Image (tube, rainbow, N blue to C red):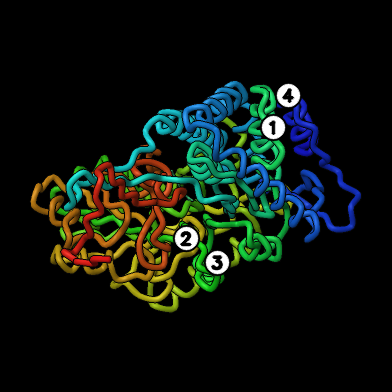
Amino acid sequence: MSHANDVSSIFQALGINADTDSKATAAIDVHTPIDGSRLARIAATSPTELDAALNRSHQRFLSWRDVPAPKRGELVRAFGETVRRHKPELGRLISLETGKILQEGLGEVQEVIDICEFAVGLSRQLYGLTIASERPDHKLLETWHPVGVVGIISAFNFPMAVFAWNAALALVCGNTLAWKPSEKTPLSAIALNGLLLRSAKELGLDADGLSELLIGERAIGEALVNHPHVKLVSATGSTAMGKNVAMACAAQFKRSLLELGGNNAAIVCPSANLELVVRGAAFAAAGTAGQRCTSLRRLIVHRSIYPALVERLVAVFARLPVGNPLTEGTLVGPLIDGRAFEAMQGALTGAKGLGAKVHFGQREQGAGSAHYVRPAIVELAEQAGPMLHETFAPILYVVPYDDFDDAIAMNNAVVHGLSSAVFTQDLREAERFTSARGSDCGIANVNIGTSGAEIGGAFGGEKETGGGRESGSDAWKAYMRRATNTVNYGASLPLAQGIRFEI
Ligand code: UN1
């Protein structure tokens, strides 16, 4: 069966009517990274359609905000259950569209299910504080309200999970959604949004405007960000894109929630359990073909164990099964496209120019015009050149260190601040790494790699990663506005700050 037919039968199994062979003049061709063949042609959203969609979202918000939060949670529960029923088809669709191995496609769908469960519980936990008032017979309260239409811009590498982290929380908080997926992965978006709207209809809810899909390239994203009905923009993608979103939002006093790049490092200390390091580093660096924002890109290794560790990693990378992501046993699928391949080769050439010893990174046999590569290990004497930049590809730079404080300084010496890790059995090193003078990242792990964060924690990072937090913990607060209420239940009107104002 061709991959395009595979897509058609997935939509059929999902019960979603998608026009995957659009005749519209403004349409987007979707190709699979597996062999470069065309999966579908999808109509793009026009500016007029975008305006109409955002008007619908705004109108729907006006009634959705009045639905009690636990009732809103029922929609998210139904959505999560529908997704669970269709996990195999959705996982396969992700694999076809992104080139992720099937198990990672299924893992991503599991993240969608998990965040729905989290949000259902949360729908009964959207609480504020009561605060002691300085005045007699007064109380101070904090109440939380939805913000309105939440615009979601998502990247190709997590074409379903990123939407779900935002959508599940934003919906229980009482917002409606407008989603612009990556133009590389509109099929995953059509499928997932279709299931969300169907879940709403099955519950007897008005699905119109609950979650509008906006298909297109950069201009559609810009129109979304600039539309007056959109009150919060949650954007995942490159730092350059995030900077534009942040500036456009700031100019209009809109909120933005940014989840941008990462140049994530792990420090390997002399006492580290090397079994954990090899497994953790190989998965984090080579898994998803290095195309997670949490992928491990830098390994900072104590000089005493450097030769032994690098030898083991080289042996593991040499035999990593690279190939068709739908084939059982494959661990590394293709890069998303030719541009990703060129960026990778450019970084490797740059490293060679600095005298690096480069292991692998070459193109591997693959079908059609696909870009399969053997994940690279790049040994540098010190952190410099391309090691200081995020390249969205499987390259693991390795440098030695002598002093633990220097290692922490190297961890922090990049513009991004998403994820980081230390491998050690020394309690002092672990505590220092996770302390205020340790890693400056939003994620700082101990004895575990940089990728694969669970949904229960807040997810996001500092500096050019954008500062936003999504998913677990109290990330829901980003999707609500806070009001402080002072209530006087007495018969007089005492003023605060000791002011006397007799009239
Ligand atoms: C991303 O690459 O956009 O920790 C996020 C992880 C996933 C999220 C990755 N839960 O790898």
Which quadrant holds residue 441? Answer: bottom left
Reading the image, the residue beneath label 4 is 13
Where disc 4 sits, the SS reads helix
Mark sitting earlier along the chain (4/1) = 4
Q: Amino acid at mark 2?
A: Leu
Q: CB under 8 Å between callouts 3 and 4?
A: no
Q: CB under 8 Å between callouts 4 and 1?
A: no
Question: How far apart are the two marked residues, 2 and 4, measured between alpha carbons?
Answer: 34 Å
Where disc 1 sits, the SS reads loop
Residue 245: which numbered mark, if any?
3
Where disc 2 sits, the SS reads loop
Near mark 4 (Cα within 10 A), the count class, few <14, some 14-19 or many ≥20, is: few
Q: Is mark 4 within 8 Å of ligand 1?
A: no
Q: Position of residue 118 (x, y in %)?
A: 42, 32
Reading the image, the residue beneath label 2 is 260
Q: Amino acid at mark 4?
A: Ala
From this view, report whether residue 203 is shown above or below residue 132. above
Q: Amino acid at mark 1?
A: Asp
Question: How far apart are the two marked residues, 3 and 2, measured between alpha carbons?
Answer: 11 Å
